[in-house]
Image (cartoon, helix red, strand yellow):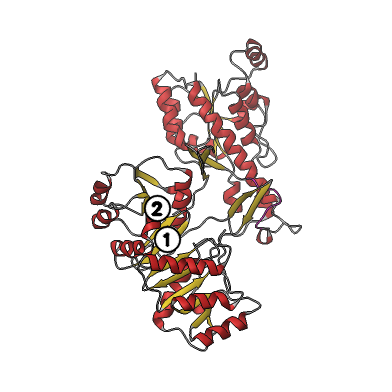
């Protein structure tokens, strides 16, 4: 039964109405510092911790709750007579509820400017100690770290004469240990990123120790194959516009591959802008993490129709993403194809009514935002590879024409589109484009020449001409043979990073063939 609660929060959201409700339930309130003052200012009777311990706060508040009167009250097992006898002997009252959130270390070090002293002072000591104590004794103590749990706990108390169930207490205890682990991990990450100068501005992007924390979203039937287990975890702090923000409106449970491919589709379509004033309506069709059709047009429907033309065979059972709301007209056409996952920032009621007839189709709604993960992470045997994300989007002003022939304005537009798509195609990538759509995509081959040939075959199979097309290569052409293949296929202009030892030979070959070539100075290897 909850008779006494200790409240000490950095995040004051909801604490006053919660404390008022506790008081109305007959709960004695104990508090510290700013929280105690806030409660008292709101007319609540509150006992200062210093009054409870008989010992004043000291060392600038570093020592206030580290005392047997606090920890004895939290740790004593109510079902152990010897524990209760010890409390009585020493005049210690049981504390049945602990409401705490910690000094804002992560918020402090996330600031552009942060002194080493500020970082250290925002390492909480008493808070984690109390949280761990209360969570360990969860059979008898209710511990809360998040205002989101206040209402649930209050309801249980009101329904059960101030009792909180073991199930709820255990759930809250698990949240505590996850929280303190993340908190300590953030401290270790930050401190081990500092150099000998201890300067915030010169800290390493890659700390000596790396602690990662994720929350499970769901278990899955299997991983990539039936004999593999799987689960999906999301970041503790999800960035806006990320796939993990999805809201599933209908359809079967997402699989491992569904999520992987959906992320590839969503990141690609996001790159084409998300408002009427920023970019065009775009559609991306993904199969096995590679774009098999990408297009921009005046409407989402037209964009889909153009993207689908690129490779309708591969689009079967694919992932489709839009950067504009999906309306009824678009849904009517899309619903005629077999699609695993459909993603858009919104769906009209007409569109949802159409897809309702295909209940297996997974329909995901995600608010658009042009943000990306702060790091890319890949598991390898015995470790992790961590790198900064491929966030570079080359601007027209950064391009360098290296051939005698200059690209026409239309060619330049096609080249920029092709380069945007190539960024999301597995290496070695060759992408033919024209008039705001992909014409042929070659992906994931050991040889760039083979990628080019595959792209040509794809275009031929789709009945699309590569004459007067633009072509993008995610890395440089090491020899002229790759260039000859794409020009023979019909390309009149090429975009590539440059940087080969044989650049002069490749440029000379482009001049010989009468095509325009531009360098980006940036490559997009995607493995």
- For this view, does 307 lie left or right of residue 215? left
Q: Residues within 10 Å of mark 2 (few under 14, many from 20)?
A: many
Spatial CA distance of label 1 from label 2 is 9 Å
Quarter of the image for the C terminus: give it.
Answer: bottom right
Residue furthest to the top in view is 81
- For this view, does 139 lie left or right of residue 493? right
**Is 60 within the magenta?**
no
At 37% from the left and 53% from the top, the residue drawn is: 316
At 48% from the left and 83% from the top, the residue drawn is: 515
Q: 326 or 374: which is nearer to us? A: 326
Numbered label attached to residue 15: none
Q: Is residue 275 above or below residue 9?
A: below
At 47% from the left and 55% from the top, the residue drawn is: 264
- For this view, does 294 lie left or right of residue 113? left
Choose top left, top right, bottom left or bottom right for residue 249. top left
Secondary element under disc 1, as helix, strand or loop, is strand
At 37% from the left and 73% from the top, the residue drawn is: 465
Q: Are marks 1 and 2 in contact (CB under 8 Å)?
A: yes
Q: What secondary structure predominates along the stretch shown in magenta?
A: loop
Magenta stretch, residue numbers: 205-211
Measured as percent of width and height from the top left, residue 356 is found at 27, 44
Q: Determine which residue is flagged by label 1.
A: 292
Measured as percent of width and height from the top left, residue 124 is found at 64, 41
In this orientation, does residue 109 appear?
yes
Q: Is residue 216 above or below residue 488?
A: above
Q: 385 or 127: which is nearer to us? A: 385
Measured as percent of width and height from the top left, residue 60 is found at 67, 42
Q: Residues within 10 Å of mark 1 (few under 14, many from 20)?
A: many
Q: Determine which residue is flagged by label 2.
A: 318
Q: Earlier in the sequence, mark 1 or mark 2?
A: 1
Q: 23 or 335: which is nearer to us? A: 335
């Amino acid at each position: 039964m909850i008779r006494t609660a200790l409240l000490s929060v950095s995040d004051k959201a909801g604490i006053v109405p919660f404390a008022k409700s506790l008081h109305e339930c007959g709960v004695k309130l104990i508090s510290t510092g700013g929280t105690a003052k806030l409660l008292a200012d709101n007319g609540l009777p509150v006992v200062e911790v210093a009054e409870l311990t008989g010992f004043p706060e000291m060392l600038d508040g570093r020592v206030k709750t580290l005392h047997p009167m606090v920890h004895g009250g939290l740790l004593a097992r109510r079902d152990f007579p010897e524990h209760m006898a010890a409390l009585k002997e020493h005049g210690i009252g049981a504390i049945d509820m602990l409401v705490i959130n910690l000094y804002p270390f992560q918020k402090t070090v996330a600031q552009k400017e942060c002194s080493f002293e500020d970082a250290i002072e925002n390492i909480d000591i008493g808070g984690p100690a109390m949280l761990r104590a209360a969570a360990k004794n969860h059979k008898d103590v209710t511990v809360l770290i998040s205002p989101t749990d206040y209402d649930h706990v209050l309801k249980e108390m009101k329904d059960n004469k101030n009792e909180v169930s073991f199930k709820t207490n255990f759930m809250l205890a698990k949240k505590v240990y996850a929280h303190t682990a993340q908190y300590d991990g953030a401290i270790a990450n930050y401190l081990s990123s500092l150099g000998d100068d201890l300067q915030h501005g010169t800290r390493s992007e890659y700390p000596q120790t790396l602690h990662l924390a994720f929350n499970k979203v769901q278990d899955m039937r299997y991983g990539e194959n039936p004999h593999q287990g799987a689960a999906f975890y999301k970041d503790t702090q999800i960035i806006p516009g990320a796939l993990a923000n999805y809201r599933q409106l209908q359809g079967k449970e997402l699989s491992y591959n569904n999520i992987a491919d959906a992320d590839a589709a969503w990141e690609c379509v996001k790159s084409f802008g998300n408002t009427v004033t920023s970019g065009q309506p775009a559609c991306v069709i993904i199969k096995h993490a590679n774009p098999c059709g990408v297009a921009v047009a005046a409407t989402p429907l037209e964009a889909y129709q153009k993207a689908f033309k690129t490779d309708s065979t591969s689009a079967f059972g694919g992932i489709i993403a839009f950067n504009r709301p999906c309306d009824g007209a678009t849904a009517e056409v899309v619903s005629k194809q077999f699609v695993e996952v459909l993603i858009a920032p919104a769906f009209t009621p007409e569109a949802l009514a159409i897809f309702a007839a295909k209940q297996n189709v997974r329909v995901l709604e995600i608010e658009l935002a042009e943000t990306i993960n702060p790091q890319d992470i890949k598991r390898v045997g015995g470790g992790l590879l961590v790198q900064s994300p491929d966030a570079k989007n080359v601007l027209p002003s950064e391009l360098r024409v290296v051939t005698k022939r200059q690209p026409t304005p239309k060619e330049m537009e096609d080249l920029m589109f092709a380069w945007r798509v190539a960024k999301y195609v597995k290496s070695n990538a060759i992408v033919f484009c024209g008039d705001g759509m992909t014409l042929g995509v070659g992906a994931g081959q050991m040889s760039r020449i083979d990628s080019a040939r595959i792209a040509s075959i794809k275009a031929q199979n789709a009945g699309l001409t590569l004459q007067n097309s633009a072509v993008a290569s995610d890395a440089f052409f090491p020899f002229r043979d790759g260039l000859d293949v794409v020009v023979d296929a019909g390309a009149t202009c090429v975009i590539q990073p440059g940087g080969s030892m044989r650049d002069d030979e490749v440029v000379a070959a482009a001049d010989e063939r009468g095509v325009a070539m531009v360098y980006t100075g940036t490559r997009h290897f995607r493995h």
